[in-house]
Structures are given as C-alpha cells and as structure tokens.
Amino acid sequence: MTLPASTPYLVIGAGIHGLSTAYHLAKELEARGLGAGSDIVVVDKHSPGAGASGIACGVVRNNYFQPAMSELMQACVEVWESDPAAYRYHGVGYVALGAACQESDLAATFERQERIGYRSELIVGERAVAEHMKELFPDWRARGVTACLHEHQGGFAYNVDSIMGLATKCEQSWVRIHSGVEVKAFEFAADGSIVAAITSQGTIAVGEQVVIAPGPWAKQLWAMLELPQAIDVHTPTGEMIEGRPMWTYWNLQEGEIRVEPKLFSLPDGSMPPVIHLDSDAPLVTDDGKLVTDELWGVYFKQDKHGVQGGASPLEVGTELELDPYPQTTDVDPDFPDMWCAALSHAMSRFEGCRPLYKLARSGGVGAFTADNFPVFDYVKPNAYGIFDSNHGYKMIGVGREVAKVVCGDHSSLLHPFRFERFETGDLHPASSSPYPWS
Ligand SMILES: Cc1cc2nc3c(=O)[nH]c(=O)nc-3n(C[C@H](O)[C@H](O)[C@H](O)COP(=O)(O)OP(=O)(O)OC[C@H]3O[C@@H](n4cnc5c(N)ncnc54)[C@H](O)[C@@H]3O)c2cc1C
C-alpha cells in the first residue's frame, strides 16, 4: 500500500494505543457524521504489535494506589470487556497479595474500587488470606502475606492476538495501517503545529491532527517534537527537583516455565486469576539458597505454553539503542532463580520448577517519564501524545478517550495526566510498592 501524500488524521505507532485511538476515532467521526472522507492513516516503522504491546505479559488490573490511575483503568476494563473474543481477553480477575507494610495501600485501593463500583474484595490478616488462597489453590503456602485484594474484574489478554484483533477492527473501518513507514522528522507551522511528517516512505501532509503513540521510542519522538529532555519537577509539598531526565529506561524482568498450562488452574480446572505476590518473608530456592530477606515481589499467570510472569524491573539509564526491539531476552542472570523460587514459595505444585524455566521472547525495555506516570496531552497545538510510561497494555481505553479529545471533547479521565503537572506540582501519590508502576 503506497503512503498517501496527505491525510486528515495521522497516527504514529501501531501498538495498543495507536490502534485503539485510530479505531475509536473512526467510530467517533462516524457517530458525528464525519466518517466519509476522513481516512485515518496509522504508520508503524515495523508492523502492528512490533513494540511493547506485542511482548507485554498482558496483565489487566486495577490495583493502583493513585485515584486517577484507578478511574482510568476502570474505563479501560470496560473496553476489554466490550469484546473479549476480538481482544482475546480473559476476565479471570487479579489477586494482589501484600506484606504488612502494604496493607494500608491495598485497603485504600479497595475502598476506592468500592466507591467507583469496581468489583473486588479485601481480605486482611495472615490466616484469613491463607484461607482465601487455599480455597483457590489448595497447595497455597506463601508466608509473609497479610493483605489480599482480589479483583473480580480484569485478568489478562494474549498480547499479539489482541493487537491483531484491534488491527482487524481498524481495517474494517476508516483506518489504513501502513507498516514499514518510519517517521524521521516533522515539519512545523509558525504556531508549532505539525504540517507534515517526513517518513522513510516520503512526506505525508496532515490536514487535521496527529496522534503520537511511540511506546518505548518515546524519547526519540519527544526529541523530534523539540520537547525538553530534562525538566524541573515541582512536588506537591512545594519542593523543586531541577533538571530531572524526562525519560529513563527500565528493563522488565519476565520469563516463563514450560509446563502443561493446566498445572496452574483452579480446582475445577478453569483458568485462575493473575497472581501478584509481594512478601517480606525470606525467599529461598528449592535447594536452600537464600535469594533475599527483603521485600520482594512477583506476578504470574497461566499462558499458552505454561506459566508466564515477572518481577521488579531493573533501571538501565537514560540512553539506550532500542532497535531491534526487544533487544534480547537477557533478563538479569539472577531472575530465573528468584522467580522460580517465588513460584515454589507460593504453591507446592511449582516445587522443582527451575529446570523448566525457558528463555523465551519475553522481557523488554520500557521508557518511563520523570514521575513514572503517563503523559497524555497535546504536545503541539495539533499533536496529541500518548506517552504511557510503560503502564499501558492494559490501558486499551486511553485510545477511546483520546479519540473524544481529538474530536474536541474534554476527558476528565485523561486530565490528571497532562504534562503541566510537573510544573504545577499536581503529581500522583506514591505507593509503598517495590514497582515503579504501582
Ligand atoms: C516485557 C514487558 C511486559 C509488559 N507487561 C505489561 C502487562 O502485563 N500489562 C500492561 O498493562 N502493560 C505491560 N507492559 C507495558 C506495555 O507493554 C506498554 O506500556 C504498551 O504496550 C505501550 O503501548 P504503545 O502502543 O504505546 O507502544 P508499542 O506497543 O511499543 O507501540 C509503539 C509502536 O510505534 C512504532 N514506532 C516507534 N517509533 C516510530 C517511528 N519513528 N515511526 C513509526 N513508528 C514508530 C513501533 O514500531 C511500535 O510498533 C509491559 C511492557 C514490557 C516491555
């Protein structure tokens, strides 16, 4: 397909955000009687799902301590639930288990979920949590867990399959996806608006608006937009942190064990919820080596070929060559021991699973903003940026909100993620989680 010389709407990036925006924008335009002639062009330097969306573990949860994240996630889960077959979504739920130091965060999250009508339950106390988990998994044996937030919505989706589902929806509407088209630079008007994108396949003029959803390539697109690579961050208490890097890379530690997927099922054989386990009990491998006696955390889910999951990511700095993506399957050498020890710590069915650990195409890099939360905002008068700070496979509903904004509406769900927050100190509260994204 030849790249057209112009388009009213240009979307850069065919990951979860670019495709969801394009699809929902087509629907919005159609609903407003503006569909015909309003072709939406999506360009991707590789192909749909070539970025982080195609490698994500696929977990969909609402366990966010930050009110704005929680409310946005509720809207995202609504989109997942709207077409589970097309999105290959499994609404099996999500269980977050925490140590004593995380009890109050989980309780606050639960109370908010109750208020907004997100279905979940909170179990507190080591014994009550163990009983709840043994009902789900009779061989549950984790220690150091005193709070459990069991979300009865959410779950996971199959990464590439869901992107293909979205791409099909796009192609059945006013959207044209052009793979192998890399945006190299922009041409700007005097007011800073983008008038054209210069790509590897020629220049494409933009009639109306551009949506930029570059995933881990955020820093490169940010530079093309001539935005600052370091910013001052004003905290809610009035402090100012000068010159903080806008983008920092973290390497997500993920892997899998190749087992019969049904090994990790509920007693009736059905698919279990996604498990996220944080604990401060000493973590020891099956052959008795101490991994850590500090707070640790893992997550895992049933997958097509076994059990897949991860642990806390590793910060890798502010400079990184990202092509090809993901760079390798190189997780930290200690990760397989740690993750398998944690599986075995949780349930006896995983005892001795370490030899079944498989080096697979999972794990990869995410680009995080100066406060580790997304920036969803206009970054030029006619260019909306979806910089999700690696929160976002689960955030399929962001595109639905962006589509409304592009059509001139306000989104109260996206408002808390505006870039201006770094200047006004309107930052999101931090939790006690060991992860940079909770
Ligand atoms: C290992 C790993 C596991 C994860 N697990 C989860 C999870 O379980 N749940 C969850 O919610 N999130 C998860 N995430 C985060 C999530 O994957 C990302 O936040 C999300 O997929 C980002 O979506 P995106 O559409 O912004 O970017 P991407 O999916 O990366 O898409 C961006 C696209 O832009 C294209 N592109 C980049 N630059 C250009 C250019 N100059 N010109 C044209 N095209 C360009 C790329 O080729 C790419 O296809 C995980 C991330 C990683 C790395």
Image (tube, rainbow, N blue to C red):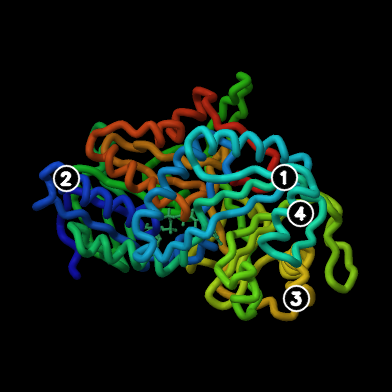
Residue 220: x and y, percent?
44, 51
Q: Name the kind of residue labelled 3 in the image.
A: Arg
Q: Residues within 10 Å of mark 1 (few under 14, many from 20)?
A: many
Gap in angstroms between the C-alphas marked 3 and 4 = 24 Å
Residue 267: x and y, percent?
64, 69
Considering only order in the chain, which callout, 1 or 3, is on the residue closer to the N terminus? 1
Residue 374: x and y, percent?
48, 42
Q: Residues within 10 Å of mark 3 (few under 14, many from 20)?
A: some
Residue 80: x and y, percent?
40, 55
Q: Which residue is mark 4?
A: 130
Kindly tell me whether residue 66 is visible in this rendering.
Answer: yes
Gap in angstroms between the C-alphas marked 3 and 2 = 53 Å
Q: Is residue 169 above or below residue 367?
A: below
Mark identifier at residue 147? 1
Q: Which residue is mark 3?
A: 354
In the image, is the residue at mark 2 within 8 Å of ligand 1 by its beta carbon?
Answer: no
Gap in angstroms between the C-alphas marked 4 and 1 = 10 Å
**Residue found 44% across the figure and 49% down from its top:** 77
Front-most of residues 129 and 358: 129
Mark identifier at residue 31? 2
Considering only order in the chain, which callout, 1 or 4, is on the residue closer to the N terminus? 4
